Image (spheres, rainbow, N blue to C red):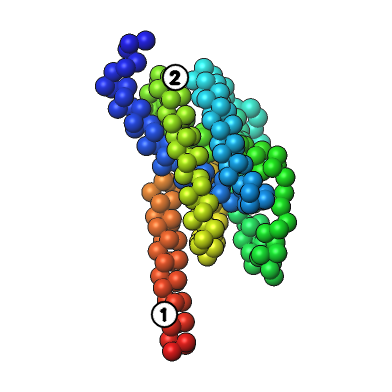
Amino acid sequence: MSALFTAENLFTLIMLIALQAVLGFDNLLYISIESKRVEPRQRALVRHAGIGIAILFRIALLFLILHAVSAFSKPLFALHFAPAFDGAFTIHSLITLIGGGFIIYTASKEIGHLLTVDNLDAEEKSKGSIGKALFWIVTMNVVFSFDSILSAMALSDVFVIMATAIVISGILMIWLSDFVAAFLEKNRMLEVMGLFILFLVGVLLVTEGGHLAHISLFGFAVEPMSKTTFYFVLAVIIITDVVQSRFRNKIKSKTSA
């Protein structure tokens, strides 16, 4: 037990918490958007409970991956429709593909909703169930956790250290979720940018899942989007939104003068 309390393990724990925090940004974005489906007074409860339940699932998933990592990478089935489609699917690739596809669907649906709805304030009164919102928050939290857990395993093989990092990062997510939700609520225009970022996350997951499944379309292999490309596109989206907002305000100030 005393071997756990070493400088090396403490440094690893700090690194793991930082890693979980960086990789958890897109998760917080999804949680904030999903929590808007319930009544305003219930949103904080849904966010906190969803993250809390997801922490338990993350620890259970960590335990499973550590003890059965080969099962997640073992081929389950293959599909061959030459020359149009070819792929060999694993548990990991299926979860990543389905999760990424669902995120793309959710982001696209919300973007379409913002474009077609006539009265956003009236739409805010139409809410879904707490159970449904909790289900999707927990489910997508587990999907997002795959990358962070696999990345954590590259830094440490000590279950207690990784589980502690998951708990601490989960507590930080609970604390930050209210700030992210409040920020998006006060800056409704940024919600559109957030949805496009979420769409980009879905593309990242789908390409990664396609790569894990060795999918090829008409002889062209699906390549994963690199993290460098992801953050570059993310920066372009944010800069474009900032420039567009300033330009819009400049036009408004001239027309009102």
Q: Would residue 248 appear left or right of 142 to someone viewing this image?
A: left
Of pointers 2 and 1, the one earlier in the residue sequence: 2
Do we see residue 83 in this rendering? no
Residue 93 lies in quadrant: top right
The percent position of residue 214, horizontal first and vertical second, equals 55, 37
Q: Which residue is mark 1?
A: 250
Residue 153 lies in quadrant: top left
Residue at (47%, 87%) from the top-left corner? 256
**In the figure, 112 relative to 34: above or below?**
below
The percent position of residue 244, horizontal first and vertical second, equals 44, 71
Q: Amino acid at mark 2?
A: Phe
Residue at (43%, 31%) from the top-left corner? 168
Q: Which residue is mark 2?
A: 159
Mark 1: which secondary structure?
helix
**In the figure, 214 relative to 66: above or below?**
below
Q: Which class describes the residues within 10 Å of circle 1: few (<14), some (14-19), or many (20+)?
A: few
